[in-house]
Image: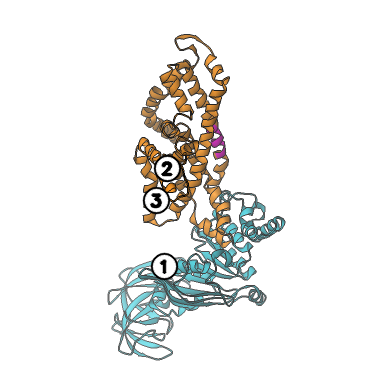
Amino acid sequence: MAATLRNVTTYDLKLAAPLAAGFVVFFVTPLVILLALSFQTDPQGGHFGLTQYVNFLGDSFSLGVLGSTLWLGVKVTALTLLLGYPVAWLHQRSPGWAKGVIMLLVLLPLLTSVVVRTFAWVVILGRQGIVNASLLGLGLIDTPLKLLYTEGGVVMALAQVQMPLMVLPLITALSRIDPNLADASSVLGAGHWRTFRKVILPLSLPGIIAGCLLTYAAAITAFITQSLIGGGQMLFMPMYIYQQASTLQNWPFAAAISVIFLVAVLVVVSIFNVLGRLSRGYTNA
Amino acid sequence: MVGASQSSQSAQRGQTLLLDGITQRYGNTLAVDDVTLDIKGGELVALLGPSGCGKTTLLRIIAGFMAQTKGHVIVGGEAIDGLPPNRRSVGIVFQNYALFPHMTVAENVAYGLDARGVDGATQRSEAQRMLDLVKLGHLGDRMPRQLSGGQQQRVALARALAVNPSILLLDEPFAALDKNLRLDMQIEVKRIQRLSGITTILVTHDQEEALSMADRVAVLSQGRLEQFSPPTEIYDAPDSLFVNTFVGSANLLGGVLLDADRSGGTVQLDAGGTIETRAPKGEVRPGGRVTVCLRPEHLRVDPAADGADTLNGVVEMGLPLGATVVHEVRVADGSAVKVSEPRIDRAALFAPGTPVRLAPVAPRLASVFAAA
């Protein structure tokens, strides 16, 4: 028994070797270089020390950028969950052909470039965009609303762009729930809302957590959408890093920001993971 | 039937259930075709049939998961057609039990009480009482996945009964259990059903389960009700060829009806010999083609008598099965006939190739149906 298990394990590791090699060369190595770079005190080389970190953590502007980026992720994730759950629920409750249509609509954004999708939002949200044109045409407003280059616009666009990352895990989680459970609940006297709250929601928690994790990680690092919709007035971490590295050529500081951003994201991810572990008890039916 | 004290209790608690002309149509197919069942309070009725016969559809209609195309579901004299499942006062035990995996056993049992707004203390004491009833009083704090299949089923039963429903529906509840456990649980469910006196519908494709547990059995085929009778009547006096062959095993022999009246008939068998049968079912007159159904235990194997016009054949195989001896005999028209005899009065096992004569153990056991 033990021998069989060990054989299976070595077999599995061999299969993973190419990926592991790629990981070491293209991920671990750059990360180590990045880490080393972040401890340089000076862009021209010089000594090693904590100067860059002290600079970042002592600077309220930098901390503000970090805070607003992490908070942006929270808002996008919350909106995506709010809009995505009903879609996943609808998918679960639909007959076969409708399931296919919904799945196609969910996946469609993934088949187009994120640049194209983001420009679509520019068209929608702009001064002469679809939203403003409609509202003006209906006489509901006199002057165009400022939608583009606002945080609300960024949240909205990011929520749409990242929607598949939320909906797909939710669909998986909901489809794992035995349909008899909802029937059992209703026969026992529970209405739709109670069945959802007491049975469906707790049992879909693993999907919610997976979806939130993916959406959050994607939203805070979404360089293109953040920059194009946010414009120049709003600065988030990816753009901040880009400016430091590319425009100001301050590689050690850019590296330090990257490491801090990475750690901050890891902290958030760990919180999600703890929640996930707490909810895992629900999944093993 | 039930003992006197128990039946009076049943009369108190069990609600009558009338399925009145239920029809369910999916597109062009009739899943249930005008089924009427009048079920007494406290009765345990089995819906028996092969898969696709409409028994599960009927169950879902009673529970309110789907609305029937035509007909009415009437509980205790009141039509409940318009009510959603959560207001029907029906309990269900699902085939896979459908216990809430994220709740403890006690929380599962208390779920229905909680939905009805019963206070916490009463919920706990009622859940405990129900768990004691199914002999799981000590496992209230466990999670469902920590229980065996039989224990999960008891929890499902306790959960269904905790809300004191008018009707209990059991959807193939024993199918997932292994054979020994299944018999234990059948006895257990029957005990609890008697004790609570609740009107119960058992959906099953297992004829032994239906015959052993039910007060009356409704045999369904392709959406139609074939027969609704007590188990012994289903077995001894089937109304149709389908019931005769679906319940128990039967040898089918072709023949011509010689004469018939209300009490019985006589058939000339194609394979040789005449046989006295029960009164024929269906449209058939003397001279018409019929199918005779003989159960294996209706016949006995005798040594062949030369030249007589009897049901003669050749032994193909003889199997001593402990309490019984089973012979398979090839008769003159080519069909194989199974004969099962108790070993008590004859130890004789005929060797393959032996010419034999088959004789009914008593007159008028065989059923006769108009040939299809």
Task: State the SS at label 3.
Answer: helix
Q: CA distance from mark 3 to mark 2?
A: 11 Å
A218 or A148: nearer the viewer: A148
Residue receiving disc 1: B50
- The colour with which the image depicts chain A is orange
Discs 3 and 2 share one subunit: yes
> Which residue does the image show at 54% across and 65% down from the upper left?
B85
Q: How many marks?
A: 3
Q: CA distance from mark 1 to mark 2?
A: 43 Å
Check disc 1 and give the amino acid type.
Pro
According to the image, label 2 marks what residue? A164
Highlighted magenta segment, given as a residue range: A268-275
Whole-percent x, y for residue A87 in the image: 45, 50
Badge 3 is on which residue?
A102
Residue farthest to the right, as pictured:
B121
Q: Residues within 10 Å of mark 1 (few under 14, many from 20)?
A: some
Q: Residues within 10 Å of mark 2 (few under 14, many from 20)?
A: many
Q: CA distance from mark 1 to mark 3?
A: 36 Å
Looking at the image, is A13 positioned above or below residue A139? above
- Which corner quadrant holds the C terminus of chain B? bottom left
Q: Position of residue A269 (x, y in %)?
A: 52, 33
Mark 3 belongs to which amino acid?
A: Ile
Where is residue B119 shown, x and y percent of the image?
70, 57
User: Crowding near pointer 3: few (<14 within 10 Å), some, many (20+)?
Assistant: some
Q: Nearer the viewer, residue B199 or B277?
A: B199
Which secondary structure lies at badge 1? Answer: loop
At a point 38% along the width and 22% down the height, the residue shown is A25
**What shade does chain B have?**
cyan
Between tags 1 and 3, which lies in front?
A: 3
